[in-house]
Image (tube, rainbow, N blue to C red):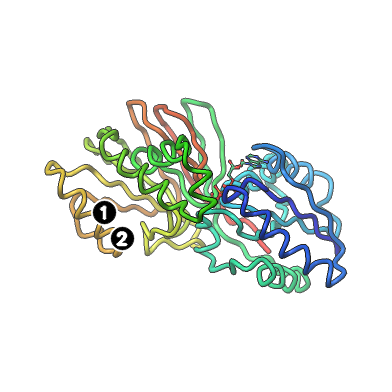
Amino acid sequence: MHFTFLVNPAASSGQAVASWQVLESYLKEQATDYEVRFSQRAGDIKEWTRLFAKYQQASDQTLVIVGGDGSLNEAINGAMAYSNANQLPLAYIPAGSGNDFARARQLPTDPVTGFKRILTNVTAGTPERIDIGEYVDAIKREHRYFVNNVGIGFDATTVKLANASTHKKILNKLKLGKLVYLSALFKTFSLQDTFQIELDVNQRRHYFNRGYLLTLSNHPYFGGGIKIMPDADERDGLIDLIVIERPKVFIKLFVILAQLMRGKHYQYKEVHRFTAAQIRIRTARLEFGHADGEELGSRAFDMVATTQPYPFW
Ligand SMILES: Nc1ncnc2c1ncn2[C@@H]1O[C@H](COP(=O)(O)OP(=O)(O)OP(=O)(O)O)[C@@H](O)[C@H]1O
């Protein structure tokens, strides 16, 4: 049994390297047959996974991604770029700052415990099938997969501002990464405007004039541990969507967001929740978007989103 580790040394502002070092000592101690590659830049993990899926599917080699949600997103997009028919099971050890995918699957954060679990599943030959999201955007002619969420509006603007933060690296090193998002969040309140949304769900069309936050998801979590859709199920083969409109009275927005943190936001008329096999989303004006925390830029969207099960060790 041979393991190939793809490590993103930039994940969690460099802290992923420490996770890898802990794991590597264990691998050496156990005389595990392994090799490791460190990504040099964004895109490496996607390309390496694509090549791995292409050339090594039949062998007893296991690919293990060590990084955050963005690294896993790259791996899925790489694996799916090669083949839809014969999916390459992926193993994943969370070492990012948000780690929402790991949270949803209750994966251990300790890399050695995580690896032991992977080893057990690989030995038994039983990968677990978990939904991954997929969308096709007609405006950008874009086809992408995501492991957690796609966001348009509020959360995407927060991602954009947090990534642009000049203090991100330092605060992450001090384990104060949440402050970056908190400060970006406050800026978003002053910057984010409302936008029109048109949805097609189960042969019905829905219009929202005061769209503020739109999140598509495979599971309950977004934004590094916030349960935005507590009832979303990552194994039901359905895609989950929430739209929050900005209330006419601005202060109510804070009430809704505060209730969101307690999982009690569905009661408000500004909160709209959908689950379906397929959802079409159209927005008219330019809005920021993100997929698994990776920026999609500022654009109008016309996307059809679905899910499909994917094998993970
Ligand atoms: N060597 C590298 N240098 C810089 N960026 C890289 C490198 N390798 C990969 N990346 C990019 O780093 C970004 C962040 O990675 P990732 O999402 O895994 O970590 P994170 O942001 O700390 O975790 P999370 O998404 O769980 O919060 C991704 O966009 C990925 O493409």
Left or right of 129, for residue 265? left
As drawn, which residue projects farthest toward the left? 249
Residue 201 picture location, percent across and down = 35, 45
The answer to which of 224 and 148 lies nearer the viewer is 224
Left or right of 23, for residue 171? left
Q: Is residue 28 above or below residue 152?
A: below
Q: For the residue marked with disc 2, what is the amino acid?
A: Met
Real-space Cα distance between discs 2 and 1? 7 Å
Residue 20, image quadrant:
bottom right
Q: Quadrant of the N terminus?
A: bottom right
Query: Can see residue 168?
Result: yes
Left or right of 62, for residue 288? left
Residue hosting label 2: 261
Other residues around mark 1 within 10 Å, as few (<14) / some (14–19) / many (≥20)? some
Label 2 sits on a secondary structure element that is helix
Label 1 sits on a secondary structure element that is helix
Left or right of 152, for residue 245? left
Residue 93 picture location, percent across and down = 65, 60
Q: Are marks 2 and 1 in contact (CB under 8 Å)?
A: yes
Q: For the residue marked with disc 1, what is the amino acid?
A: Leu
Q: Quadrant of the C terminus?
A: bottom right
Residue hosting label 1: 257
